Amino acid sequence: MYRGAGTGLMGLGIVLVVVGAVLKYAVTVTTTGFDITAVGVILLVVGIVSVVIGAGVFLAGSHSRAFSRESVRYTPSGQERFVEHHDSGVVP
């Protein structure tokens, strides 16, 4: 997994939590047919879930293993160098 996806998801979750908290606790507007506090609660819940999932993706991405192997082969025309890179757990 890619760790950047986890940090982006956590950042989005924090923004949603802040906007949801403002709508839930700081806005005191009454409207007909549209409940702003309900929207705030929904954004709070979605933001918290996003932060939790983002933390899980971030932690899953930190367990990747990378290794490389280099070999030199001698041929009649000279030497050839081969380098192999393996990176498990990281999505390109």
Image: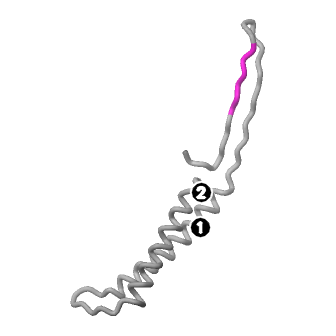
Does 49 sit left or right of 66 as displayed? left
83 is higher (above) or lower (below) than 23:
above
Dividing the picture into quadrants, the one containing residue 79 is top right
Q: Residue at x 22, y 87 (%)?
A: 33
Question: Which range of residues does the magenta coloring cover?
Answer: 79-84
Say if mark 2 contacts mark 1, CB within 8 Å: no
Element marked by disc 2? helix
Residue 68 is situated, as x and y percent measured from the top left of the image, at 73, 37
Q: Kindly identify the amino acid type of the residue bearing the numbered disc 1.
A: Ala
Q: Residue at x 73, y 41 (%)?
A: 67
Q: What is the image's colouring?
A: one colour
Element marked by disc 1? helix
- Foreground residue, 91 or 5? 5
| Residue 8 part of the magenta-drawn span | no
State which quarter of the image contains the C terminus: top right
Q: Residues within 10 Å of mark 2 (few under 14, many from 20)?
A: many
Q: Kindly identify the amino acid type of the residue bearing the numbered disc 2.
A: Arg
Ranked by sequence position, the earlier of labels 2 and 1 is 2
Q: Residue at x 42, y 81 (%)?
A: 20
Q: Which residue is mark 1?
A: 55
Q: Residues within 10 Å of mark 1 (few under 14, many from 20)?
A: some
How many numbered discs? 2
Instruction: Tell me how far mark 2 sits from mark 1, CA to CA.
Output: 9 Å
Q: Which residue is mark 2?
A: 3
